[in-house]
Image (cartoon, helix red, strand yellow):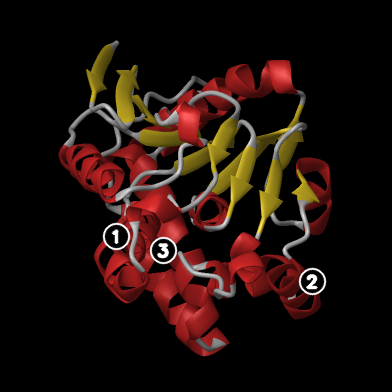
Amino acid sequence: MTASDQTDITLLEDNGVAWLTLNRPDKLNSFTASMHQQLRDALRSVQTSDTIRCLVITGAGRGFSAGQDLADIAESDLDQVLERDYNPLVTTLKGLNIPVIACVNGVAAGAGANIALACDIVLAAQSASFIQSFSQIGLVPDAGGSWSLPRLIGLPRAMALAMTGERVSSEQAQSWGMIWRSIEDDQLIAETQALAHKLANMPTIGLAFTKKLLTESWTRSLDEQLLLEKDFQMAASKTADYAEGVDAFLNKRKPDFKGR
């Protein structure tokens, strides 16, 4: 187990799983320019690692993230902040070739909610909640929220949440299909660890192809998607993990996947 402390975030690696913790608990882990720079550095190290095969993002203290720290931004800088910080963060999370889990331990509001929803799988404590708080200060959803919400829960619910800023409990979020699972608070970390280690020990190249297939399906016709499935299936079938999986299946043994 190795750990790296970077003030506003911490990055810890444990048997193939990287735990990235937003670490401004006194400010509900709200984002600043400094935190974004540290996130870029951390995600770059995750991308180039030969040992990390799953990423977990969570928050320190009683919340996941309250979104942007408004004290750290000027009105004229909003477009620059999105272009420099949030947009690259969302596209990086979507583009990582490993599974990304959001472990939502408390409130996730504004950009904090939408960064969580940009992850591949979202687990949330029963006490956690999701809030599209932008309308309360005259802004619009960002950090990919206007893209992800309608796709996750449908336009009517997405429209109402974006306009009203109504709080959504983790149990309601699960019921609507916004997240994967709502979990009892005292079981959140253990269940996240179990899922992360399960994914890290799976054939992660195939998981990366699956992630790309599903993400890109929104912009493709059925015929285009069928062709892409064929291409990715051929590429997956040439990996060492596929050969290992088939051999393990035929010989009735547990596979030992290496992510290659």
Task: Give the residue type that dot 1 points to.
Answer: Asp
Q: Please identify the quadrant where the N terminus is shown.
A: top left
Q: CA distance from mark 2 to mark 1?
A: 27 Å
Q: Mark 3 or mark 2, which is nearer the start of the sequence?
A: 2
Mark 3 sits on what residue?
Answer: 212
- Contact (CB < 8 A) between labels 2 and 1? no
Residue 218 sits above or below residue 108 on the image: below
Closest to the observer, 259 or 113 = 113
- Contact (CB < 8 A) between labels 2 and 3? no
| Residue 186, quarter of the rendered image | top right
112 lies left or right of 14: right
The residue under the point 15% across, 41% down is 48
Of the numbered discs in the image, which one, if any, rests on residue 13? none
The residue under the point 58% across, 33% down is 63
Q: Position of residue 13 (x, y in %)?
A: 31, 21
Does any portion of residue 59 appear in the rendered image?
Answer: no
Q: Position of residue 232 (x, y in %)?
A: 37, 65
Mark 2 sits on what residue?
Answer: 157
Q: CA distance from mark 1 to mark 3?
A: 22 Å
Instruction: Tell me the element at label 1.
Output: helix
Q: Residues within 10 Å of mark 3 (few under 14, many from 20)?
A: some
How many numbered discs sit on the rendered protein? 3
Of the two numbered discs 1 and 3 in the rendering, the one whose residue sits closer to the viewer = 1
Instruction: Tell me the element at label 3.
Output: helix
Does any portion of residue 43 appear in the rendered image?
Answer: yes
Q: Position of residue 59 (x, y in %)?
A: 49, 32
